[in-house]
Image (cartoon, rainbow, N blue to C red):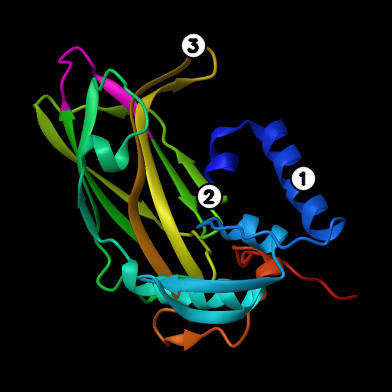
Amino acid sequence: DEVLAVGDAEFQKKAIGKMQDVSRGEGRTVLFVSHNMGAVRNLCKTGIVLNQGQVAFSGSAEEAIGFYTDSNVHNCTRKVLINDRDHRDCILPKDLEFIEAEMLNEDIEHLATDEPLKLRLKIKKNNPSINEFNFGLHITNMSDVCVGTIVSPSIRCPQKSEFDLFCTINSHNLVKGNYHIRFNAGIKDVSLGIRDFDVLKNVLSFSIEYLNGLEKSSYSVWHPNWGNHLLSDCTYIAN
């Protein structure tokens, strides 16, 4: 899927359309290799999951996606020391620089929909003149689709070279599945524009397994077409 990764939206649309034409109209078999579950779901009818070069699963595309995502529950990432190679795609001024990220929840492989997400970021202040900033966070699902975004109000920088930023997401309402978290820090003001100090990818990951954290009640069923959020704060009136 590297061909899709480097193109813009219009190019990706044409490339996907061509692959579909070749496989359906011309009767050829197209072998599509990807970690993007959304692209696999859209393009493929059957799927094979490989693990260290060996076939771990073979079946329908939907079943293969389920096997792949369930297997990745053990790849949750609690704590990360940030480095350019693994976590940054572009060169930024790093007036504020992320140097460490951590999830503070006890069991990040078996979280619940109603359980707050607790995070700690260690930040280095490379530019002493920076007095305040905005913190951003993006949560993506296994199809690399963003399912939640946070843009904080202005946060005052402590007067020291390194400091910890704690963030608690109280009502995320995410359903059963595996998720990744990306971070950014900068100045975000619609009247002044956006200026990024640091942007991270592939940082932390976690898994939602339960509907209710106290009772540990599991999801009996949740279809992928139902989305990634359980809307719970609702009012109902029957007349």
Label 2 with label 3: CB-CB less than 8 Å: no
- Decide which of 238, 128 is in the foreground and name it: 128
Secondary structure at badge 1 equals helix
- Decide which of 103, 153 is in the foreground and name it: 103
Magenta stretch encompasses residue 129: yes
Q: Is residue 116 visible?
A: no
> Earlier along the polypeptide chain: callout 3 or callout 1?
1
Residue 18 badge: 1
Instruction: Determine whether, in the image, residue 111 is placed left or right of residue 96.
Output: right
Instruction: Determine whether, in the image, residue 16 is placed left or right of residue 210.
Output: right
Q: Which residues are magenta?
A: 125-135
Instruction: Determine whether, in the image, residue 50 is placed left or right of residue 198.
Output: right
68 relative to 31, above or below: below
Measure how far apart labels 2 and 1 are at the Cα level: 31 Å
> Earlier along the polypeptide chain: callout 2 or callout 3?
2
Kindly identify which residue carries mark 3. Answer: 192
Question: Which x, y percent locates residue 78?
Answer: 25, 61
Looking at the image, which residue is at 59% across and 88% down?
220
Secondary structure at badge 3 equals loop
- Decide which of 74, 27 is in the foreground and name it: 27
Secondary structure at badge 2 equals strand
Looking at the image, which residue is at 55% across and 58% down?
33
Measure how far apart labels 3 and 1 are at the Cα level: 42 Å
Amino acid at pointer 2: Gly
Kindly identify which residue carries mark 2. Answer: 148
